[in-house]
Image (cartoon, rainbow, N blue to C red):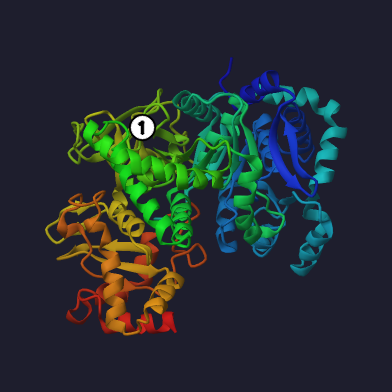
Amino acid sequence: MKRTIIQMLNLSKERYGSKGYLFDKDSSGWNPTTFEKTFEESHYVASSLIGLGIKSEDKVAIISEAKTRWILLELGTILIGAISVPLSIKLLSEEIPFRINHSDSKIIAVSKITLEKVLKVFDQFENKNIKILFFDDDIEFAQNLFIQYKIPFESHFISYFDFIKSGKDNFEKNRSKIENLKEKVEENSVANICYTSGTTGNPKGIMLTHLNYWSNCHDSIELFKVPDDFKTLVILPIDHSFAHTVAIYAGLLRGIQLYFVDYRDGTAGALKNIPINILESNPNFLLTVPALSGNFMKKIIDGIEGKGKIINFIFKLGLSCGIKYNGNAYNRPSILTRIINYIPYKFADTLIFKKIRKIFGKDIQFFVGGGALLDVKQQQFFYTIGVPVYQGYGLTEAAPVISSNTPNTHKLGSSGIIAPSVQCKIILEDGKEAKVGQRGQIVIKGENVMKGYYKNKEETEKTIKDGWLYTGDLGYFDEDGFLIVVGREKALLISEDGEKYSPEEIEEAIVNSSEFIYQVMIYNDHKKFTTSLITLNVDKLKSFLKQREINEPNKILDIIYNDFQKYSNDSSFKDKFPKKWQPSTFMIVEEPFSEANHMINSTMKMVRYKITENYREKLEYMYKSEGMKYNNEENKKVLERLLK
């Protein structure tokens, strides 16, 4: 038996047949597509692609929000040995041509949300015969945009209705061709080309094979022991390998039901629909990244603050006692510690935490976290309120899961245990393998390691050596065998004496300990001390100042500085970071880092080199005598503009 996605699709039909797999919301409610129907419709997709001249190893790009038709197109593409190129809906128009041209895509599938950004740059596509497959049913909307951008509609447009009808009408004629193409798909055949988000320059196309996904899906299921009646609401972007492995393909293997966020009112409407859709779908688990779970955490805390002093006191006391009671969730605290903290913890759980859990639906059991570092404070928070975030570690080049905490084996502050089929070691700068507790580069080997970077042999050879994938991430194994990830090697800061250290842990600590700091990027490039750029939660700061009738700039900056320094006195972080690593001052940035200004990528990570380039003057100012103190004149000017 070949270990391919095609085989996973076959097995899903046999095992789960009439059970719902994919759920879109329309005016009548949640509309299911069964596993059997998914199998059938994906074959109609394959038939239609053949009719359009798509051959084995041709590329089909998809730039759309998650929906049933997205999944059907990808599966149909894969069935005939063609390659799916999933792209983020958050890409700017100018970022699309490189990916389309580099991947040699022959079709671009879009939705109402993404059509215009594709048509804006249509003339930059090298393939002048490229087709636009439109997922939505509003043909008039699409036609008007084609006219607006002077693109021949009949030559390039395909409606999904016509596309699937053609595939169905011609299926019997194409059946033997489809079966022959399916047979030619091997374990090492490329299934996807996933583009990196380009935090350090041009994006690279990561070639992930059928075996990469097969292996990683089986590892994920083995780690979590997922039963075959689980549901999830897909909140994370569907183009990410994380959602592919742990949702789409694991869904095929274990019968997981996938509900898609309602995007009928656009992106802004989708954000409002997430809490509604969670309650409607009642997921057993949710996929998250630190930025998303951090947003959940802050909203919960803000909501509790509005409930009055007594509830707020019980919440904070219960949270503090719960954190002490649970310890790191692996090594149990002393009996005395548990006895002392039990009653206030359980009282808060009964009175408050139980109600908070209902925000995530009546069936929620846990989150699975990935994408970036999740600081221990977030892990402690969610574990204590009874919806643990089981943080994992991975990267797209590893399809992506390398390690994870699980319901059965977890330690707060870690990225969990290594996946069953993955080999992992820590390599020091001198090339030797690290001992327990020694930091170095995380290096892995296994059937989940990518085939390479598309059209980029040089980068492939730098990254994969003798079968070992050099992740570029830094970490270590603790005494219990848990992987601790500390940051990106390329993001390392360097002090004046040449010592290297990771900024991510400190940044997460600052943001998650403060009330008014929205974002922070710390900086040191061979300097005497570490500095930082911060953005503010302006609305919350304004409310705080108004209640206390504070308007004097120096006093406001003192409040921000004290808030900025809270992490250094927090028991979760106290004594964790050497003093010289900690930022001694900050400059306030008016505009938050975002995807729109290119400072945040599609995986919600800061693009450091762009932030550094953009705010070079502010960074240099902090190393001048007038800028060394946080209450400098520049910060006062920025505050005045923000608070007016």
Image-quadrant location for residue 58: top right
The residue depicted at 55 percent of the width and 55 percent of the height is: 98
Residue 188 image position (x, y, % from top left):
53, 27
Between 331 and 224, the residue placed more toward the observer is 331
Q: Mark 1: few, some, or many residues within 10 Å (few <14, many ≥20)?
A: many
| Disc 1: which residue | 410
Considering the image in quadrants, where does the C terminus appear? bottom left
Give SS at disc 1: loop
The residue depicted at 61 percent of the width and 45 percent of the height is: 278
Residue 494 image position (x, y, % from top left):
20, 57
Considering the image in quadrants, where does the N terminus appear? top right
Examine the rendering and report whether any part of residue 110 can be seen.
yes
Residue 343 image position (x, y, % from top left):
34, 40
Between 165 and 590, the residue placed more toward the observer is 590
Image-quadrant location for residue 161: top right
Examine the rendering and report whether any part of residue 201 can be seen.
no
Amino acid at pointer 1: His
Residue 477 image position (x, y, % from top left):
25, 33
